[in-house]
Image: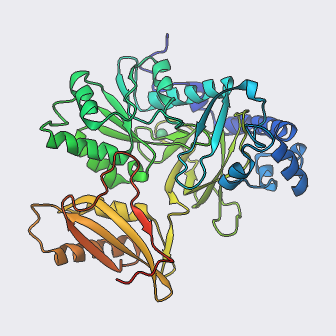
């Protein structure tokens, strides 16, 4: 590969396209994919006809607003219908080279098929993110994500195509992963933010100094919100002495669709692949860039299963103003899952806000559990935390400190803060941590 390692861009022309030019390309691809979906995927033919819209109605990017939404349920209801790939698929099975499936954490797993071209473009996009965070061919990279069915698994190919030395770590037990970090001295690792934190803690307990005994310079995190919560990112950075970059992916699209640059101010999204809309979570009305709502994605170049106006379930916003790094593709910020947001005293509360508070406070471990429950016909929340072993404050004092900080940040006080000793919460899992328990509908008195 003759790429100049000093060039900060993987694909300079694409990444720095003037927005007008970028939107021109988006429009060409949008016209093509909407027609392709209509002509080849039975679901789109039916739903466009029912809505009275035709591919030829797309004259500008805004015309996408005339088309109907789809969501996770559409995927579930249509998969396996008519053919193995289902009614959203637009190519025959012979053209498909890879399928991933979602984790099924919110219901039946959904399947995402790729043609060879879809897959190659997916990996080129992953190379672009790796390059963006500074990965170069002289890096050693550990991909510590699940390889089984998960769309994040093959992202390692993007690092390999870039020329880095790749170690397919997968979900190795921590002891073996620490052995790899100590012996092979990799420079970059990708894992979930909670696991990055736990692995660092385990390393310390095993007698290592993560800053000195390893050679990790950069940590990529994805799958949970932590990497975009400044306090969480800084806590992981301090523990490892490494820079943390947040990536965002969707099992329905790519392992990573968006990634932070060196300025960590939102995540650049691959707008050459994804047309982003933001809609009001209650009315479905399309909002302006910069406004917060549910993110809706249209895939512009994936032919195996095009997604036209897919409601992601993620609440966030897109910033299309120029980034200091020179990239022109917009930056998304994710506040949380729509399903995780809860309303207390008419205030929208996101678990990510609570996490930010917990990770900023001194004298507590940073582990937490949020319980949402109903009392007196209104939603309330309680937070469970762990006090550091060397914290001399009483549990009541710690609870009061955290409660006041939560009120300041979210606008509503928790009904209760329960203080456990260090290690008292069973939240240190090796996979995605479930930290929000919704107990509404369950009789719960506190
Ligand atoms: Zn940037």
Q: In the picture provided, is 213 more to the left or to the right than 217?
A: left
Q: Quadrant of the C terminus?
A: bottom left
**Number of numbered labels in the structure image:** 0
Q: Is residue 310 left or right of residue 30?
A: left
Residue at x 69%, y 49% (from the top left corner): 75
Whether residue 215 is visible here, answered yes or no, is no
* Nearest the eye: 444 or 16: 444
Give the residue drawn at x 18%, y 78%: 396
Q: Is residue 267 above or below residue 149?
A: below
Question: 271 or 157, which is in the foreground?
Answer: 157
The spot of residue 150 in percent (x, y) is: 52, 37
Based on the displayed image, in which of its 4 quarters is residue 263 positioned? top left
The relative height of residue 46 versus residue 112 in the rendered view (above or below) is: below
Instruction: Residue 262 in the image: state x and y as whole percent.
Output: 40, 38
Q: Residue furthest top?
A: 2
Which color scheme does this rendered protein use? rainbow
Relative placement, left or right, of 101 versus 221 is right
Q: Is residue 392 left or right of residue 171?
A: left
Nearest to the observer: residue 99 or residue 1: 99
Q: Which of the 4 image quarters holds residue 414?
A: bottom left
Residue 167, x across and y down, in percent: 37, 23
Which residue is situated farthest in the bottom direction here?
Answer: 376
Res 284 quadrant in image = bottom right
């Amino acid at each position: 590969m003759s790429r100049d390692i000093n060039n900060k861009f993987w694909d300079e022309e694409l990444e720095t396209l003037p927005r007008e030019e970028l939107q021109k390309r988006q429009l060409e691809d949008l016209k093509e994919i909407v027609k392709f979906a209509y002509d080849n995927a039975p679901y789109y033919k039916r739903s466009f006809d029912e809505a009275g819209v035709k591919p030829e109605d797309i004259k500008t990017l805004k015309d996408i607003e005339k088309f109907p939404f789809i969501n996770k349920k559409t995927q579930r209801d249509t998969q396996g219908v008519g053919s193995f790939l289902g009614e959203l698929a637009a190519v025959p099975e012979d053209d498909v080279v890879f399928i991933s499936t979602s984790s099924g954490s919110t219901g039946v797993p959904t399947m995402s098929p790729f043609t060879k071209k879809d897959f190659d473009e997916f990996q080129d996009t992953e190379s672009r993110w790796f390059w963006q965070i500074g990965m170069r061919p002289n890096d050693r990279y550990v991909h510590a994500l699940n390889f089984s069915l998960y769309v994040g698994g093959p992202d390692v190919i993007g690092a390999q195509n870039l020329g880095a030395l790749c170690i397919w770590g997968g979900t190795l037990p921590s002891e073996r992963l620490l052995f790899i970090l100590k012996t092979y001295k990799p420079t970059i690792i990708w894992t979930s933010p909670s696991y990055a934190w736990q692995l660092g803690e385990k390393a310390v307990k095993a007698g290592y100094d993560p800053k000195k005994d390893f050679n990790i310079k950069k940590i990529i995190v994805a799958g949970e919100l932590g990497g975009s919560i400044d306090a969480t990112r800084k806590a992981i950075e301090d523990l490892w002495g490494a820079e943390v970059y947040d990536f965002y992916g969707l099992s329905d699209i790519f392992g990573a669709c968006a990634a932070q640059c060196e300025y960590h101010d939102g995540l650049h999204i691959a707008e050459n692949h994804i047309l982003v809309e933001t809609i009001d979570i209650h009315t479905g009305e399309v909002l302006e860039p910069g406004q917060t709502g549910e993110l809706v994605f249209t895939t512009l170049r994936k032919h195996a299963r095009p997604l036209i106006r897919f409601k992601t379930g993620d609440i966030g916003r897109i910033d299309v103003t120029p980034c200091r790094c020179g990239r022109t593709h917009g930056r998304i910020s994710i506040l949380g899952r729509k399903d995780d947001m809860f309303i207390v005293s008419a205030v929208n509360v996101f678990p990510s806000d609570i996490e930010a508070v917990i990770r900023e406070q001194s004298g507590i471990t940073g582990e937490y559990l949020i319980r949402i429950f109903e009392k007196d016909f209104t939603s309330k929340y309680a937070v469970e935390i762990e006090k550091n072993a060397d914290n001399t404050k009483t549990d009541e004092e710690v609870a009061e400190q955290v409660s006041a900080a939560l009120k300041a940040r979210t606008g509503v006080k928790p009904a209760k803060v329960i203080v456990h000793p260090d290690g008292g919460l069973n939240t240190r899992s090796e996979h995605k941590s479930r930290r929000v328990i919704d107990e509404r509908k369950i009789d719960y008195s506190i």
